[in-house]
Image: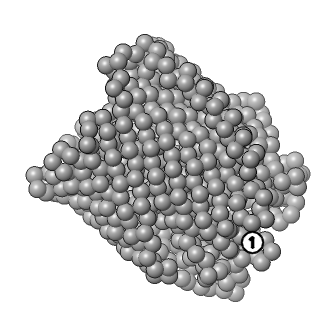
Amino acid sequence: MREGFTVLNKNMICGASVLALGLIPYGASAQTSDPVAIVVTATGFEQDRTESGQAVSVIDASTLERRQARTVAEALQQVPSVRVNRTGSLGSVTGVSLRGAETGQTLVLLDGIRINDPSSTGGAVDFGNLLLGNIRRIEVMRGANAVAYGSEAIGGVIDLSTSDPTAPNGLSLRAMAEAGSAETVQGLADLGYRDGDLRLDAGITGLSTAGISSAAERFGASERDGLRNWTAHARAQMPLSDAVALDLRGYAIDSKLEYDSFFGTPADSADVSEFGQETLYGGLEATSFGGALTSRFALTYLTNRRDYRSAPDAPVDFGYRGETLRFEYKGKLALAGIGHLVAGYSHDTPEYRFFGFGSDETHSAATDSVFGMLTVKPAQRLSLSGGVRYDEHSAFGGITTLGANANYGLGDGLTRLRVAFGEGFRTPSLYQLYDSYSGNAALAPERSTSFDAGIDRSFADGRGRASLSAFTRLTRDQIGYDLTTYRYTNVARTRSRGVEAELAFAASEGLDLALAYSLLDARDLSIGAEEARLPRRPVHAVNLSLDKTWRMGLSLGTTLRIASGSTDPLAPTGSIDGYTLLNLRARWQAAEQYHIFVRLENAFDASYETAYGYGTEPRSVFAGIQLRY
């Protein structure tokens, strides 16, 4: 324990010292204040960032286009305390962890729909299936917020949106095509129409690649494992009257992946997996009492399909089906200039099915939830929020969680202080409870308590923003897999703590700098574990991006990503090495309607792993064209 405290404290001082350079108000005046930024993840409704004490990062459409990422997981690495590991080639199982939490302890929303897979082992989202082409905005709320979201939000919430809030009136078209290394081709088309409050949007994106060997080539594996992924979305927002609007959303993924399944020494295999997902959202939003009350009623449906074959033309060996039907109501009531109250009710009915190896079993659960969150402004620069939630689960009975946070602006108009307390929980997945081989019906829900505090600073006449946060989270009854009994069990405790730094700075006209750094100390505190570090969670991670745009329409950019080594129980030494990746990119606005772009990924041709035994892409080059009308 002493070693963990020493490392953490030394690096907290270093991290704070580095960020303090960015907090100096270079060229700033005392009258300058942060530009208004709207976030939605803290409560589910649009909210001024200065009203929330939670740590929230936003990646907007222009940043996503400028960085030229292909997948959601790659884009998320711009955010502090995000750890990504992938088991092989593009499209392989990809886990995302926030602040050291388990992958199933991160709640993921896509156009307002919870897409955590009810049929997966831990209820996690496989980010290997999420292409970035049709995603226009990403919000990441780091830290527990069970009051607003209930189960799975122990680590935080990732909110993905296909909506483009900046779309102009009339008809608009966005299209892109690119090709590059490993016989990779990708394309997208997105068509939209806007007439005042009427918004229609639909699009499709596809990617095909011959890939690399999922098993690392250093073990003699050489067979390429390819991917084919089609993703489509549609959305319609239609006013039915001055006070009522209809909101319809749909999203679908169809993916086929070749992968290497091995036990022991990594090796080639002919295995194939197929994934399908459909989500549907139907909602009504209404205002009443002169606009004081905003009500949102929604019915959502999610279905997941995963099939596994030992060879491309072989019959399905085994498969999973997941399905969730959810009804929810959320209301936001303005309190006469004092603040607002957000309250809600939801009913969830997840279902899980597994078939194969002579077995065919189906299990389900139901949860009813109510919550209330109050935000008040007792002073001009102070905002306080607090809430309580009660969930009634069909297997575990009642669970109550609390949360509170505060945001305070200093008199200089440039600096804001944040502090947050949150309880979180996650009920065991249906797989963990009922799987005939490894399930354990005696499992208890995971529970967490987290604290974090931070400072946000605007400088350079609003052209820069810096943030520094420190956090700690203790999780009780965390669920793990016991390699001696081959069953899931509740681990006594885990602890995660660290510091995060973010800096965004428009240093001069056309020159943009973005930095994300995090120090993470995540450990298993169960008896006999000797405070071992939790696996696949690098202690240090840095993401630095620099972009320069000239008036002639040419822009050049680079991203440097550094991750320290991490533990991995499958590695003979118990750990895997850290790595440094450099990506280069160029973009040229050849005409008003289209851009030509090129990028070089892994310019150093680094050989690295994020999970022991699984390969990663070597140096690769891609080029394409983007049209916009």
Tell which residue pokes out farthest to the left in this image.
290
Dividing the picture into quarters, in which one does residue 34 lie? top left
Residue in the foreground of this view, choosing between 362 and 56: 56
**Residue 477: % across, % down:** 62, 69
Q: Using the image, determine if residue 227 lies above or below residue 395.
A: above
Residue in the foreground of this view, choosing between 260 and 607: 607
**Residue 114: % across, % down:** 45, 61
Residue type at numbered disc 1 = Asp
Residue in the foreground of this view, choosing between 264 and 209: 264
**Residue 343: % across, % down:** 29, 61
Q: Quadrant of the C terminus?
A: top left
Image point (65%, 80%), residue name: 440
In the image: residue 515, left or right of residue 297: right
> Is residue 46 at least partly visible in the picture?
yes
In the image: residue 264, left or right of residue 186: right
In the image: residue 562, left or right of residue 39: right
Image point (59%, 61%), residue name: 475
Q: Residues within 10 Å of mark 1 (few under 14, many from 20)?
A: few
Residue in the foreground of this view, choosing between 316 and 43: 43
The residue singled out by tag 1 in the image is 482
Dividing the picture into quarters, in which one does residue 602 lie? top right
**Residue 242: % across, % down:** 12, 52
Dividing the picture into quarters, in which one does residue 458 lie? top left
Image point (36%, 37%), residue name: 408
